[in-house]
Amino acid sequence: MSEIAYLPIKSRSLYQNVSDEDFGNHFWQDKNSVVRIQQLEALLKDVISPEALEDMRGGITKSGMSIRLNPYVLSLIDWRNVYGDPVRRQFLPMASELEDDHPYLAVDSLGEQHTSPVPGLVHRYPDKVLFLVTSVCPVYCQYCTRSYAVGQDTAVVQKANVTSAQNWTAAFEYIRANAQIEDVVVSGGDISRLKPANIRLLVNTLLDIPHIKRIRLATKAISVLPQKVTSDTEWFAAIVEVVKRGREMFKDVCVHTHFNHPNEVTPAVEAAMRKLHAEGIYVRNQAVLLRGVNDDSRTLIALVKALGRVNIHPYYVYLCDMVTATEHFRLPLATAQRLEKEVRGATAGFNTPLFVCDAPGGGGKRDVHSAEFYDDSYGISGFRSPSVDPNRIYHYFDPIRALDTVAQEAWRMPGAKERILANLGFAPMAAEAAE
Ligand code: SF4
């Protein structure tokens, strides 16, 4: 079918005896997903060393996210290069890779729960809400921004319950009552976990609200479970139906997805995208910049070009949020700024992602080049977000590892932020001083 060249992957190495029919079936993929270390040990005991397995066991006990990997994702991993593999690193933590948290990391680093008028509905920008409709995903990304609510409890994070059916009712009422809201991002969790009837209920209810003009449906399934699109006929039909109904109403319903590395763009993804594209469904990608996964321009350019070839629009590349237990993934702002310059110009402008920092505390997405100030010796930058709060500066902190020993020590002292800002000559703004 394909004339597109894909990067080599270790496809099916663990599942040689599984039929193509089973492997291509979303239900089989889900049913055979690995969610416990004992399942991983049974699967990998003859594939990786006992030391690497022990390292994984240790990593899982220290992570803020539970694990869930299906055979498709496990087959993307080159197990001969288990420490260097960019797919493994995203979904399977190793104790030896983890780093002590920066003191300003937080479970809900974007402060979503503080900007939720009803649980599960984040209202930050005047005309847009984020509607969290489920707490489950086909895989669990170890750097997840929504680690406070998504997946199972771990030893590190007890999950908040923000996605109940009562919350849906309250969210619909809030959206109906606030006519300035035009744009709804439906996320979670992952909408691929919703039943077709619930997709229809959710999107049709939103479409019927006159002031709602745009709906974005967030799913990582295109990247990690493309079989959902190609083999779950009823689910796919529900997506097609609501997108078409939106179009007939002159409203925009599109899909947002999440690829981080070109190895994830496979023939199975192309097959899924051919189906979506044939129905006129527009798909945008939101990638996260992750140390050891995609923190070089060669990989990012390959990702952008691979996505473009399967008609996925590269929309954002995020600095990794300041989430508890993700220090090993984070990169300094300076790295994001340099990578943006190196990626821009490699392909057409409309096909080039915007590199953003989702400002901690709820400032929203800011261009990485738009910091009001940046002191890279202490790794502290400040962003303004006038449409959210004109009186506030939102701070991002580079990972501790990127700083020299004097700066590392300074961050470990109580009251570090205020003292470092004062020493650098930055007085807190009124709203911050009042916090
Ligand atoms: S798919 Fe999205 S919501 Fe789910 S674990 Fe990954 S980043 Fe979090």
Image: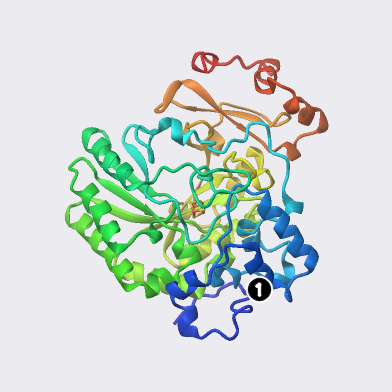
Residue 182 can be seen in this image: no
Viewed as shown, does residue 186 lie left or right of 395? left
Q: Residues within 10 Å of mark 1 (few under 14, many from 20)?
A: some
The residue that appears at 78% across and 69% down in the rendered structure is 49
Q: Is residue 316 or residue 389 the one in the foreground?
A: 389
Residue 3, percent from left and from top: 48, 79
The residue that appears at 44% across and 30% down in the rendered structure is 114
Determine the image quadrant of residue 45: bottom right
Furthest toward the right, the residue is: 405
**What residue did someone put label 1 on?**
43
- Whether residue 341 is situated above or below residue 111 in the rendered picture: below
The residue that appears at 58% across and 60% down in the rendered structure is 261
Viewed as shown, does residue 88 lie left or right of 307? right
Residue 304 can be seen in this image: yes
Q: Amino acid at mark 1?
A: Leu
Q: Quadrant of the N terminus?
A: bottom left
- Whether residue 20 is situated above or below residue 422 in the rendered picture: below
Residue 318, percent from left and from top: 54, 45
Q: Is residue 153 or residue 287 the one in the foreground?
A: 153
User: Is the CB of the residue bearing disc 1 within 8 angstroms of ligand 1?
Assistant: no
Check disc 1 and report its element: helix, strand or loop: helix
